[in-house]
Image (tube, coloured by chain):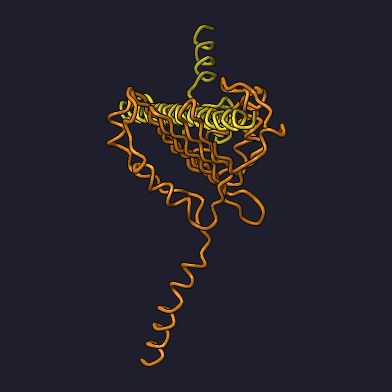
Chain colours: A yellow, B orange
Amino acid sequence: MNEDLESRLRAALRPVAPGEAFSQELIARVTADGVSPARAAGRRRFFAPAGWLSAALAASLLLAIGVQHHLQERHQREQGMEARRQVIEALRVTSQKLHLAYVAIENQSS
Amino acid sequence: MRNCNVRLFCACLLAPVLAWAAPPSPRLLLPDFSALASKASETVTITLDSALLAMAGRFLDGNDPEDAATKEVLKGLQGIYVRSYTFDEDASYREADIAGVRNQLSAPGWNRLVETHSRKSHSNVDIYVMVANNQPVGLALIASEPRQFTIVNIVGAIDLEKLHRLEGQFGVPKLEWDSPKAQPPNTKK
């Protein structure tokens, strides 16, 4: 009885090679979960030292561009404000001298 | 070869004619006043070309009345040039220092609009305007006082009415230029 059961179990649990359909279904499921073999390879590359270096370089480059843009904007703003100040100063001087001329004309007429 | 010589000869003949026919520039060549600047107690040197005027215009607030009036004046202007020197003592500069500028204003195209002399303040103010096609295209102002002289040159389609309207701002008291008493140009006391 025991031997019979054992032989039946062995027959039932014998190693069986997976079929072609099983492999395809497995790959399809892995792809559906978003972990494609290519992405997995990419992750491995990213976490490798060379990946970190590239990311750091890209971040530094972006930061440098941002800082440069900010400095350029600030410089242009300073230039604009200085030009504005000069325009107002120039018109103030002109107005003063026109006023001087007017006073002279008024004094002469009165 | 002969044709080339004829063209060269014609060009030589035409050059002075073209130079004479060229419209005079409303931009004055302001001398280098560095020697006077070193003696002056206060110096104002302003050189604003069209690019800088445009830049300044972008930084003027249209909602602010003073800025809005300034913006209006700047429309059509191509340059503003100011040289002003204030000294601690009388007679620190000579009339000859300004003669170079006065000579330029005697060129055709410039018209003296106002010439004033005040015995009280010993000040002279001369205002010149260059007109083209019945439109003022340049303004020059020379103000000389015992301790100060100022030269202003404004290039472009200057609107004297708008400039006049600026009076009362920048700390200058508003006066009625349109009053009959203030009309006569070329007046000398």
Residue at point 54%, 19% (across, down): A12
The x, y position of residue B28, in whole percent, is 45, 48
Q: Residue at x 30, y 37 (%)?
A: B34
Q: Which quadrant would the N terminus of chain B be assigned to in this image?
A: bottom left
Q: Which quadrant is home to the C terminus of chain B?
A: top right
Q: Is residue B118 visible?
A: yes
A54 horizontally vs B72: left or right: left
Q: Which residue ends up furthest to the bottom in the rendered image? A: B2
- Which residue ends up furthest to the top in the rendered image? A2
* Quarter where residue B166 is shown: top right
**In front: A34, or B9?**
B9
Could you tell me if residue A55 is visible in this image?
A: no
Instruction: Give whichever of B187, B82 is nearer the camera.
Output: B187
Say which of B59 and B120 sits in front: B120
Q: Quadrant of residue B4?
A: bottom left
Residue B91 x %, y % = 33, 30
* Apparent side of residue B179 relative to residue B20 in the rendered image (left or right): right
Q: Residue at x 57, y 43 (%)?
A: B77
The image quadrant that residue A109 belongs to is top right
Please give the name of the residue rendered at 62% of the width and 42% of the height, measured from the top-left corner. B185
Residue A110 locus on image (x, y percent): 64, 28
Q: How many marks?
A: 0
Q: Residue B88: x, y in percent?
A: 33, 22
Left of A59 or right of it: where is B176? Answer: right
- Toward the viewer: A49 or B5? B5
Q: Is residue A1 above or below residue A66?
A: above
